[in-house]
Image: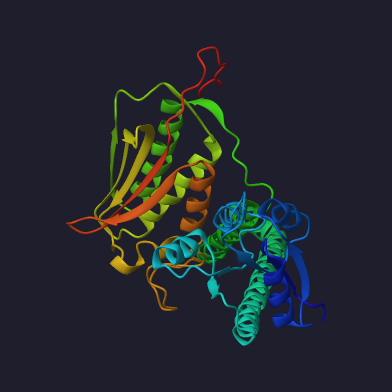
Amino acid sequence: MKRQTVMIVDDTPANIEILSESLGDDYELFFATSGLDALELIRADKPDLILLDIMMPGMDGFELCGILKNDPSTRDIPIIFVTAMIEEEQEIKGLELGAIDYLTKPISPHIVRARVKNHLELKRYRDLLETLASAADRAKKEFLRSVSHELRTPLTPIIGMTDLVLNQEEDGNKRKYLGMVQKSALRLLGIVEDLIETSRLEGEGGAPENAPFHLKSFLDTVIMEAQALADGKGLTFNVQVEPALPEAVVSDQGMLHKVLTMLLGNAVKFTPAGAVGLEVRRQEVAGEQMLQFSVSDTGVGIDQADLERIFSDFTQSDGSITRSYPGLGLGLTLARRMTELMDGSIWAENLPDGGSVFQLQIPLVLPDPDAVLPVPN
């Protein structure tokens, strides 16, 4: 096994010698007598741990620690300060900068060996966990991608052939059973499409394609589709659109449509009776103009503890296998990821009189005056 590396940074050669003798031959040791020299060596070949003196001319230990912790490529290197200073204020400063421990002078070889060993073991386990997590994440993405495409391939002819037979079949009972097959296949296809979209967003195809589009025409389409869903379930659909909204905005129209479709579809799905609603308005957040969509319902509501959890993978508020509403719980996960790609935010709230409301905010970006807009549908 490759030996772990320790860098000793101290402007006093006698201290370097003591620390080196304390660590013996258990580690690969590197040395620097100034902060600038250490910074150059660390960036060229990152050590597993740094023993860092505080009091050095030029760049002292605090400054070097701050630089390393602000650099993503070096921030994870454990730093132990070696110092004669024991004031609480200095100790707090070092820990706030990101150091993990202190060694005080005069140096005790036994303490040096014990603390270096413990912190390097912790780093080894942390690195191992990160490697395993990364491997598991890659395996999950590859599994989703592979399984999703394998499932979609046979579903397409099943749906197509069922539709063909339905158009020719006159027997009422046979049409009923074929309709059940088609409905189940379409539901499964929806789940597969969610899995494929999840894989795509976690891969290289998730960048938004921002372009100007007509907001009113876009909203008319969203409202028409949601109205059909609500009518099919006998629900009232309430719409409030701020009259002063701009004619055109810049965003990823396809992503925004998918997110709103998911939110409105969920509102209808989880509302046995009553109403669903869509409100669209401007909202100023920290001095920035945002476009806010509020999708409300009078449905089953969400447990307070689940208001954040429902945006996680494969999660519904009711997680039992006997839940009343089928699905993998990927819709809100996709909605959150797409919203984040659009530099927006999404969250859920419970309404005082029952039901829930999902809030979606994206930056309100106006097109250039000379921009050519697509012809409204």
Q: Residue 329 location in percent, x, y?
A: 48, 64
In the image: residue 368, left or right of residue 363: right
Residue 85, percent from left and from top: 49, 67
Which one is nearer the viewer's eye here, 260 or 135?
A: 135
Asked if residue 26 is positioned above or below residue 148 in the image, the reply reads below
Q: What quarter of the picture does the N terminus occupy? A: bottom right
Q: Residue furthest right?
A: 1
Q: Nearer the viewer, residue 311 or 88?
A: 88
Task: Give residue 266's quadrant in the image.
Answer: bottom left
The residue closer to the viewer here, 292 or 216, is 292
Q: Quadrant of residue 158?
A: bottom right
Q: Identify which residue, 263 or 310, lies in the foreground.
A: 310
Q: Residue at x 64, y 70 (%)?
A: 130
Q: Residue furthest top?
A: 370
**Left or right placement of residue 38 versus residue 210 in this view:** right
Relative vertical location of residue 222 with respect to residue 33 in this rendering, above or below: above
Which residue is painted at 69% across and 49% down in the image? 204
- From what the image shows, is residue 19 above or below residue 367? below
Can residue 195 be seen in this snapshot?
yes
Residue at image x 30%, y 49%?
296
Residue positioned most to the bottom: 110
Q: Residue 27 location, x and y as percent?
A: 76, 78
Figure check: 260 above or below 371: below
Residue 343 position, x and y percent, is: 49, 41
Residue 326 picture quarter: bottom left
Horizontal side of 3 relative to 227 (left or right) equals right
Q: Is residue 303 visible?
A: no
Total labels drawn = 0
